């Protein structure tokens, strides 16, 4: 399965491909947005070009800020975001992407198409799409072995 299938399943479930926030926003604003959308990361907008991103801010960044006893209302997203993002392409296969995420200790990865970031994919998105793919395979194999089509004998 390719990453474009993961993106398609995410969108099919009614989720936005990605959420973003301004680099000038505070970490509290980022935390509020993440809580509202029930997500764990936001792309950070490039202030000079629409649809361009300069980094990613995650719930881990917010936790580290809290652990460092810093004020979430004073720390800007641009101060703690990850600038050197690990990205993957829509044509990449899922299994190597999961390995990459494990090696890099990341739970969110920007998904690119023709060099532009199109989505932010979480490990949860990948797991859901993989589970769905496995369910389809199991149903098809069950039909094949049992001489049925969608559990109807033919």
Image: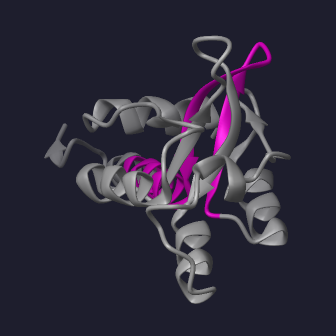
- Residue pictured at 49% horizontal, 43% vertical: 25
Of 3 and 45, the residue lying toward us: 45
Q: Split into 4 quadrants, where in the image is the C terminus?
A: top left
Q: Which residues are magenta?
A: 107-136
Tell me if residue 56 is in the magenta stretch: no
Q: Indicate left or right for 22 with 16 as reference.
A: right
Q: Position of residue 147 (x, y in %)?
A: 31, 47
Of 2 and 154, the residue lying toward us: 2
Total tally of numbered discs in the picture: 0
Is residue 8 visible to us here? yes
Of 92 and 72, the residue lying toward us: 72
- Residue pictured at 77% horizontal, 40% vertical: 87
- In the displayed structure, 151 sits above or below 52; it is below
Residue reaching furthest to the front: 74
Q: Position of residue 141 (x, y in %)?
A: 43, 52
Q: Position of residue 74 (x, y in %)?
A: 52, 61
- In the displayed structure, 135 sits above or below 102; it is above
Of 105 and 63, the residue lying toward us: 63
- In the displayed structure, 107 sits above or below 43; it is below
Is residue 90 visible to us here? no
- Residue pictured at 66% horizontal, 39% vertical: 110
Q: Indicate left or right for 59 with 64 as reference.
A: left
Q: Indicate left or right for 135 with 26 as reference.
A: left
- Residue pictured at 74% horizontal, 41% vertical: 93
Dividing the picture into quadrants, the one containing residue 88 is: top right
Q: Split into 4 quadrants, where in the image is the N terminus?
A: top right
Dividing the picture into quadrants, the one containing residue 48 is: top right
Colour scheme of the picture: one colour
Tell me if residue 124 is in the magenta stretch: yes
Q: Position of residue 81 (x, y in %)?
A: 69, 53
């Amino acid at each position: 399965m390719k990453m474009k299938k993961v993106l398609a399943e995410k969108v099919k479930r009614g989720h936005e491909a990605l959420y973003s926030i301004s680099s000038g926003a505070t970490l509290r604003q980022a935390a509020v947005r993440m809580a509202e959308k029930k997500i764990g990361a936001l792309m950070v907008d490039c202030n000079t070009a629409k649809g361009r991103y300069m980094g990613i801010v995650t719930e881990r960044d917010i936790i580290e800020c809290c652990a460092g006893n810093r004020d979430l209302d004073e720390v800007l997203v641009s101060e703690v975001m990850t600038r050197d993002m690990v990205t993957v392409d829509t044509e990449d296969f899922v299994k190597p992407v999961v390995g990459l995420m494990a090696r890099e200790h990341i739970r969110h990865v920007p998904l690119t198409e023709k060099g532009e970031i199109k989505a932010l994919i979480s490990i949860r998105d990948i797991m859901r799409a993989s589970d769905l793919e496995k369910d389809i395979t199991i149903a098809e194999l069950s039909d094949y072995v049992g001489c049925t089509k969608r559990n109807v004998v033919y």
